[in-house]
Amino acid sequence: MKLLRRRGLTQVLSVLAAVAFLCGAFAVKRGLRGGIIPQPGEELMYFPSGKFLKQASLGHNSTLADIVWLRAIQYYGHHRLTDRRYDLIGHIFDVMTTLDPGFTHAYVFGALVLAQDAGRPEEALALLRKGMRHNPADWYLAFETGFIYYVVLRDDESAGRYFSLSCKLPGAPEFTARFAAFVEERAGHTETALKLWEEVSRISDNERIKEMAEEKVGKLRRQLEEESRVSGRAGSDA
């Protein structure tokens, strides 16, 4: 057993040594071409792709993903305190999530940095869509996608669609239905919003939220009735 453990450890250390060597090679090559000398901890960012790292990892994908995560935090912190430029952040999180496709927090954190710090919301959404392809039942990824559409892009239509998806996925907390109902109402989807507020009223344990949801239900029902009467009058006039 000890021998097996040593062999496993040796494999991991060998992979890490190879990674360090290759990262250094990429950084030196970039420097020779006139690029900026990398800051400490940035060497890992110069790998061409996560697929390359995955092949080089000898099965230790999660270990390497954890290392990239630590380097990503270091990279983000350095640039947040200095030039606030995050040119490599998309590449870093693409590498990380290729190594470990189930690393939900990496998709979310990477997307928030891309959307809010780097000002690249479309790239953030692409990262989250990658996460949803690999984790289709994860409510958190769908919710964060809706969040970026709503807060950053001010797109109520798309935000409502992803919030609505989120609240239907396993383990979704009650507040996801509230977000979905609120945004669907703003987007003018009255019937969808009504169903969502009815669901919030049904599942909420908070009396204040339940009361608010019931008020919304009453308001939206009256709105639908009014729309129906207007539509009926317009039809008879025609």
Image (cartoon, grey):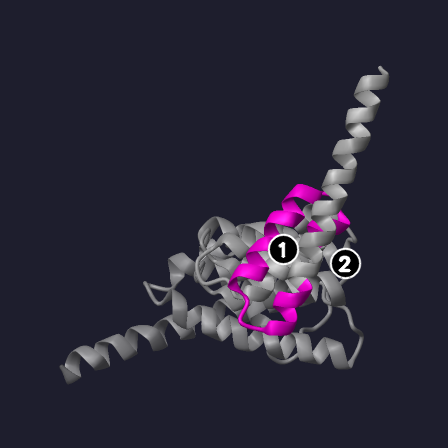
Above or below: residue 121 compared with residue 82: above
Q: Amino acid at mark 1?
A: Trp
Residue closest to the far top? 238
Q: Tell me the quarter of the image containing the C terminus.
A: top right
Residue 82 position in % (x across, y down): 78, 79
The answer to if 193 sits in the magenta stretch is yes
Range of magenta residues: 183-212
As drawn, is 122 to the left or to the right of 106?
right
Depth check: give the residue in front, 145 or 99: 145
Residue that label 2 marks: 152
Callout 2: SS? helix
Residue that label 1 marks: 197
Query: Marks 1 and 2, how far apart in space?
Result: 24 Å
Q: Is residue 29 visible?
A: no
As drawn, is 18 to the left or to the right of 196?
left
Q: Amino acid at mark 2?
A: Val
Residue 43 position in % (x across, y down): 58, 72
Residue 92 position in % (x across, y down): 59, 64
Residue 147 position in % (x across, y down): 68, 59
Depth check: give the residue in front, 201 or 26: 201
| Residue name at image x 69 percent, y 49 percent | 184
| Residue name at image x 66 percent, y 54 percent | 181
